[in-house]
């Protein structure tokens, strides 16, 4: 009986920490505030892809204009 209470408490902690992480992610991703987790993860993936493309473009430009 004690073990099942401990498991429930552990699940609550995990759920709480997951919620906190989702809220933090919502603040980091542009347009992420108020999105449901599924859409937030999709938006996050798109955002990461955009950042990678920008990084590649900047690297290419820096190689072209390197003295």
Image: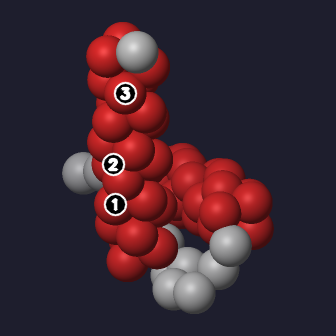
Between marks 1 and 3, how big is the CA–CA gap? 23 Å
Can you give x and y, in whole percent of width and height, for residue 41 in the image? 66, 56
Find residue 56 and name its label.
none
Give me the residue at 75% from left, 68% from top. Answer: 39
In depth, the one of 47 and 67 nearer the eye is 47
Give me the residue at 57% from left, 87% from top. Answer: 34
Between marks 1 and 2, how big is the CA–CA gap? 5 Å
Q: Quadrant of residue 36?
A: bottom right
Find residue 5 and name its label.
3
Q: State the SS at label 3.
A: helix
**Which residue is most to the left?**
67
Horizontally, residue 35 falls left or right of residue 22, namely right
- For label 2, the residue is 17
Give me the residue at 43% from left, 33% from top. Answer: 8
- Whether label 1 touches label 2, CB < 8 Å: yes
Tell us which disc is closer to us: 1 or 3.
Answer: 3
């Amino acid at each position: 009986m004690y073990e099942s209470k401990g498991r429930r408490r552990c699940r609550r902690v995990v759920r709480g920490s997951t919620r906190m992480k989702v809220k933090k992610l919502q603040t980091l991703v542009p347009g992420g505030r108020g999105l449901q987790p599924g859409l937030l993860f999709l938006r996050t993936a798109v955002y990461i892809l955009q950042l990678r493309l920008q990084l590649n473009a900047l690297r290419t430009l820096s190689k072209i204009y390197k003295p």
